[in-house]
């Protein structure tokens, strides 16, 4: 809800699905710190001091859904329309976004990773019409 309320759409006119994914992955990271079965976690040493046991690998948390050109943000109508709206601001980037190089990257993303439970949940909400922030106002619509 933070992306829909004060931190996101309400103030900026933007709901960032990349931010939502980064927040979710951050939560998973912090939960791992307290999970003794995790490959890295905090534990107390012989002096009763907290130490990090194991090694952290950021690659376990960063994923293509952080890429906002792939996992596009949604916008309010007010933020999207008008001569200074994002529909005009983003239009010059359409050729680059549709370039073979970018499309190859998107194809790679789609074949090499599985979406998180959080993103799958948001996509399910979109598919059932319960979440409509990207339905009419997103990067794809600027390039139509």
Image (cartoon, grey):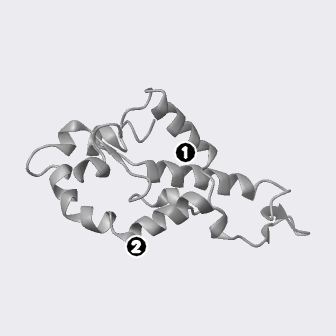
The image quarter containing residue 129 is top left
Query: Residue 4's image quarter?
Result: top left
Q: Residues within 10 Å of mark 2 (few under 14, many from 20)?
A: few
Residue 140, horizontal then vertical, whole percent: 31, 50
Distance CA(mark 1)–CA(mark 2): 25 Å
Residue 32 shown left or right of residue 64 in the figure? right
Label located before the other in sequence (1 or 2): 2
Left or right for 77, reference 118: left
Foreground residue among 125 and 110? 110
Give the class, few, some or many, for how many residues have Cα within 10 Å of label 1's Cα (few <14, many ≥20).
some
Residue 2 falls in image quadrant: top left
Disc 1 + disc 2, Cβ < 8 Å = no
Report the side of 41 relative to 89 (left or right). right
Q: Residue furthest front?
A: 100
Q: Which residue is mark 1?
A: 119
Q: Nearer the viewer, residue 117 or 24?
A: 117
Local SS, label 2: helix
Q: Which mark is residue 101?
A: 2
Measuring from the top left, give residue 101's x and y in whole percent.
40, 73
Residue 21 or residue 103, whichever sits in front: 103
**Which label sits in the foreground, 1 or 2?**
2
Residue at image location 73% in from the left, 58% down from the top: 33
Quadrant in the picture for the N terminus: top left
């Amino acid at each position: 809800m933070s992306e829909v309320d004060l931190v996101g759409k309400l103030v900026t006119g933007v709901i960032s699905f990349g931010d939502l994914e980064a927040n979710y992955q951050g939560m998973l990271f912090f939960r791992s710190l307290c999970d003794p079965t995790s490959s890295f976690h905090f534990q107390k040493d012989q002096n009763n001091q907290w130490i990090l046991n194991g090694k952290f690998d950021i690659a376990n948390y960063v994923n293509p859904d952080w890429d906002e050109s792939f996992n596009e943000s949604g916008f309010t109508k007010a933020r999207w329309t008008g001569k200074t709206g994002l529909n005009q601001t983003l239009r010059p980037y359409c050729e680059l976004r549709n370039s073979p190089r970018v499309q190859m990257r998107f194809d790679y993303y789609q074949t090499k990773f599985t979406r998180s439970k959080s993103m799958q949940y948001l996509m399910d909400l979109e598919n059932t019409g319960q979440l409509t922030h990207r339905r009419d106002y997103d990067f794809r619509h600027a390039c139509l």
